[in-house]
Amino acid sequence: MQYISPPAIWLIVLIAGIGQLSETVYSPALPAIAASLGVKASWVEYTLTIYLLSFGIGTLFWGRLSDHFGRKPCVLAGLAIYILGSLGCYMADSLSILMISRFIQGFGGSIGSVLAQAIVRDAFSGPNLTKAYSSIVGALAVFPAIGPIVGGVITQQFSWPMIFVFLIGFGILIFLVTLQKLPETLTIHQQKLPSLLTILCQLAKDPKVIGFGLLVALCNGITFSYYAEGSFYLIELLGLSPSQYGMTFALMASATIAGSVISRKTQSKFGSITMIKYGLWGILASCSLLYVGVLLKNMLNISSINLLILTVVVMMGNMAGICIVTSNALAMSLQNYRHAIGTASSLFGFFYYIGVSLCTFGMGLVHNGTLIPMPLYFLSLGIIMIIVFKTLLKENP
């Protein structure tokens, strides 16, 4: 199979965005779901963990399968499973059913991560690959902006199951657009599948792959932990309504877009490794500021509105830094594995999504209904990322 021209960036964004939308639109409803199902907040946060776990398993499955059958058929199959899982979430009347359905939804929705990345790596190379990733990561900021706003309004005006009706409709829309518009990007020379074990051993022995994977996992760990814990932090502890909470993500999105523009404009001048370094120090500074702010609130009785403003500003800094780090890390991570990019992408995606799921699980474990756990947890992740950068990645690529 041979394609004539690269697929449109907007189409790749739609495919990649389905996973992000499925989480961000769901975030404002977490307190309402906990109350509706009569379960603890931490248990509802684990519906995010199981979603990300199945997401990781899905990346392992779809990337390998797409190396044999092609990208487009696997995207369509994954979307069909995603729609089925979303239907199960809508019909769920217990936490166990919701967990199972979220697992199915995440497994299908994982095509948005691994196959979007494989398609990008099929179609672009060199500096164009990094620029494509920066554009895509920036454009994906639309979903964290729209998702919580839509989810907050739906939760407040209707009920949380209606969120999944919205996701079913979105899944059907992407299925139809993909069917019509997505070209097959898998080339003929990729049809012979490389040994999964061989590629796994190569990746496991490559410190740069491990380092980039850990950075992507920890960056997304902060992001998804905020989706899980932030709703309780801002809604229950700082007094925002679900719709107001959703509105704050428009600011997060603007910061992500800013990070994308910075990465795209300065990548040629500074190089990816330097950009990652700057992004990591920005994340650490933001996390430190939030932790200090929460400590000062407890010590000096600072008003909730001031802490609310600080939290939003800090998370904007985090999102800009995370965009810079992840776009450059993803572009550099598998440069030496183009001969088996589908399999390598699936293994790499599995690795970092398992890391993300562990991060969200840890966030659920430390949740205690106070303001302290989230800032302290984010600061800890920021410190770990600096250590990973210093030990596994060099200043010069």
Image: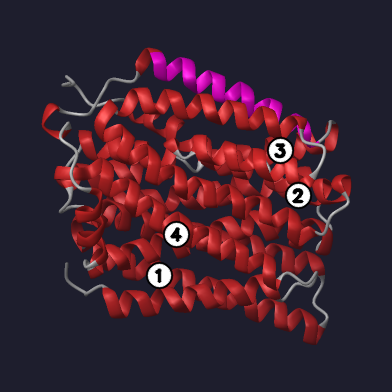
- Amino acid type assigned to the residue bearing label 1 in the image: Leu
Residue 175 highlighted magenta (yes or no) = yes
Residue 280 is marked as 1
Q: Which scheme is used to colour this image of the protein?
A: secondary structure
Dot 1 falls on a residue whose secondary structure is helix
Q: Is residue 136 visible?
A: no
**CA distance for labels 3 and 1:** 30 Å
Q: Which residue is mark 4?
A: 322
The quarter of the displayed image where residue 310 is located: bottom right
Above or below for 365 versus 234? below
Residue 113 in the image: state x and y as whole percent.
41, 42
Q: Is 327 on the left-hand or right-hand side of 106? A: left
Q: Is 188 on the left-hand or right-hand side of 238? A: left
Q: Which one is closest to the eye, mark 4 or mark 2?
A: 2
Instruction: Give 232 or 217, whichever is nearer the viewer.
Output: 217
Q: Which residue is mark 3?
A: 151
**Span of residues in magenta:** 160-179
Q: Do labels 4 and 1 touch, CB within 8 Å? A: no
Residue 55 highlighted magenta (yes or no) = no
Q: Is residue 47 visible?
A: yes
- Amino acid type assigned to the residue bearing label 2 in the image: Leu
Residue in the picture at 47% in, 69% down: 283
Q: Which residue is mark 2?
A: 30
**CA distance for labels 4 and 1:** 8 Å
Of pointers 3 and 1, the one earlier in the residue sequence? 3
Instruction: Give 257 or 28, whichever is nearer the viewer.
Output: 28
Question: Could you classify mark 4 by the number of other residues whose Cα lies within 10 Å: few (under 14), some (14-19), or many (20 or more)?
Answer: many
